[in-house]
Amino acid sequence: MRKPFATGNWKMNTDSSSSVALAKGVADGSTELAGRAVDVAICPPFVYLQSVIRAVSSSNIAVGAQDVYFEEKGAFTGEISTSMLKGIGCTYVLCGHSERRHVLGEGDELVNKKLTAAIGGGLLPILCVGELQSEREARQTEQVVKRHIEEGLAGIGEEKLSAVTIAYEPVWAIGTGLTATPDQAQEVHAFIRKLLAELYDDEAAQATRILYGGSVKPGNTAELMSQGDIDGVLVGGASLKVEDFLAIIQAAV
Ligand code: PEP
C-alpha cells in the first residue's frame, strides 16, 4: 500500500516571515495526519529552508528544496549541493520541475545528474515530468513522459528507485487553473507505472509513488486521489494558503 503524499512547492512566492508563518500553520494544523496517514512535505525557497526546518522541527512535516546542483563543491557560483541541503535537515528535493525545464532551460541529462547526486547525497528526489500543451495536442504526451522518465532515471538501479517519487505535472495545468481531469491524469499515471514495470519490475513499479500536480485545489484533490495510480499531489498556488493546503492534506488521506 502506497502512503499518500502531499507536497507544497512555494516557488518564489514567500518571504522570510510568511515562510515561517506558513510552515507553522501547516505543522500545527496537520499534527493528527502528517507522517501517520499521509506524508507531507513543503518546499520553500533556498534562503528560507533553515528557518522553515526550525519552524516544523517538532512536527512530522518534511522539508524539501526546489532544486539542487549535482557537483559536491567547487567553483559553481550560486549553486547549492546535496550535502549543503542534507546538512541543514532537508529530506526531499524537486528535480526537473517544469519551470526549471522550460524557464531555465534544463534538459533531461542535467535533471538526471541532479537526481543521481540527490540520491547519492541521501536526499529523496521528486522527479517532475510532463508535457506542454502543444505536445498534448500533437498526441505526444506518452512520448514526452517516457523520455523524461527514461532519461531522468538513467543509471538508477532498482535498489535506488525506492528513494524516488515521480510527479506527473502537465505543463499546461501548472498555475493556469486548468486541471487534468481525473481520467486524463489516471491515464498518464497508469502509463508511467507500466513504464516503471518495464524498466524495473512490477514490484518496484507498484511501490513507487506517483504524484499529480497542476492546479490542485481542496475541491479537486479527493477525486484525483480516488484514481488507482494517483498516490499524492504536488501543489503550487494552493500550498501558499494554510487552510487550502490543510484541506488538501485532509483530502489526500
Ligand atoms: C507546481 O508548482 O508544481 C504546481 C503544480 O503549481 P500549481 O498547483 O499552482 O499549478
Image (cartoon, rainbow, N blue to C red):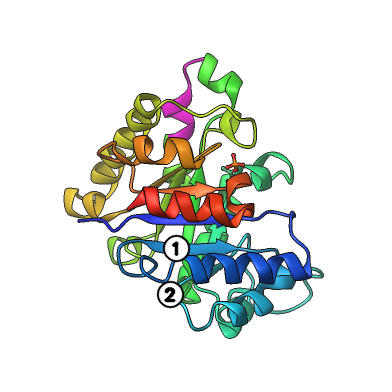
Q: Name which quarter of the figure residue 19 lies in.
A: bottom right
Magenta includes 190? Answer: no
The amino acid at mark 1 is Val
The foreground one among 122 and 21 is 21
Q: Which mark is residue 40?
A: 1
Q: Quadrant holding ligand 1?
A: top right
Sooner in the amino-acid sequence: mark 2 or mark 1: 1
User: Quick check: marks 2 and 1 in contact, CB under 8 Å?
Assistant: yes
Vertical placement of 237 versus 179: above or below? below
Instruction: Determine whether the residue tagged by mark 2 lies in a helix, strand or loop.
Output: loop
Vertical placement of 62 versus 42: above or below? below
Vertical placement of 223 versus 196: above or below? above
The answer, for residue 79, to whether it is visible in the render is no
The foreground one among 177 and 138 is 177
Instruction: Determine whether the residue tagged by mark 1 lies in a helix, strand or loop.
Output: strand
Residue 253 position in % (x across, y down): 32, 53
**135 displayed left or right of 31:** right
Q: Name which quarter of the figure residue 37 lies in.
A: bottom left
Q: Residue at x 47, y 27 (%)?
A: 180
The answer, for residue 72, to whether it is visible in the render is yes
Vertical placement of 108 versus 79: above or below? above
Q: Residue at x 59, y 72 (%)?
A: 24
**252 displayed left or right of 227:** right
Q: Residue at x 67, y 69 (%)?
A: 21
Q: Which residues are magenta?
A: 138-145
Q: Residues within 10 Å of mark 1 (few under 14, many from 20)?
A: many
Residue 138 position in % (x across, y down): 52, 14
